[in-house]
Amino acid sequence: MVGGETANCLLAGEALYASVIDRVVPVSSTRAAELTKLLENIHRSVNIGLANEMKLIADRMGIDIYEVIDAAATKPFGFTPYYPGPGLGGHCIPIDPFYLTWKAREFGLSTHFIELAGEINRDMPEWVVGKVADALNERQKSLKGSRILALGIAYKRDVDDMRESPSVFCYGTSTRSWRYCRLF
């Protein structure tokens, strides 16, 4: 995706990226290019939020959400499967929606849908740890003092980037509040 402030800028950007990228998609401006990036990331955030909320519902109902998603994916009417997880990670998807939310306010708009997906995704790490605590309790073990091995703390498979990963958090023991921590 490339846009330019002028027609010549656009041509220069297209030529530059065409030398290293198979498909360059020109748009009318840098603002359109940036909004395209935001739309794509927000699309994923909202759909992951939906998958996460459906996971909460399916879990409470005793239904395997993965079976449901896989069955829904057989429909030929444009369903794209998104799978639940412990939240969002990376440098774009957890951040870009809230940038647009902030920017939309400058234009007198609210982004309820985007913000709701963000709330669902933000709360998933706490839900996951709650499930771990429940599993420990079923085995008559306490979360406090337990040693738990967490493998794969990046936000998606085969990525070594752990920025904004929901796997990197700390538990505030006195207030049951969650806060993100740095590992280094």
Image (spheres, rainbow, N blue to C red):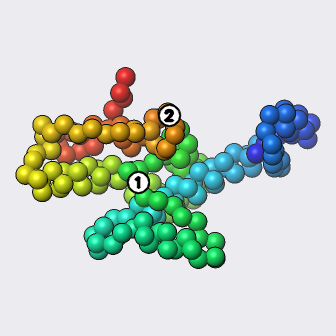
Quadrant of the rendered image containing residue 74: bottom right
Query: To which residue does mark 2 refer?
Result: 161
- Nearest the viewer among 169 and 118 is 169
Query: To which residue does mark 1 refer?
Result: 85
Relative height, residue 52 to residue 159 (above, below): below
Q: Residue at x 52, y 37 (%)?
A: 159
Q: Is residue 74 left or right of residue 61?
A: right
Q: Is residue 107 left or right of residue 26?
A: left
- Residue 175 image position (x, y, % from top left): 17, 43
Q: Is residue 11 left or right of residue 79?
A: right
- Residue 10 image position (x, y, % from top left): 86, 40
Q: Residue at x 36, y 29 (%)?
A: 182
Could you tell me which secondary element the residue under label 1 belongs to?
loop
Task: Name the residue type under label 1.
Answer: Gly
Residue lying farthest left?
140
Gap in angstroms between the C-alphas marked 1 and 2: 17 Å
- Residue 59 image position (x, y, % from top left): 30, 67
Crowd band around label 2 with a 10 angstrom C-alpha radius: few (<14), some (14–19), many (20+): some
Q: Which quadrant, please, contains the N terminus?
A: top right
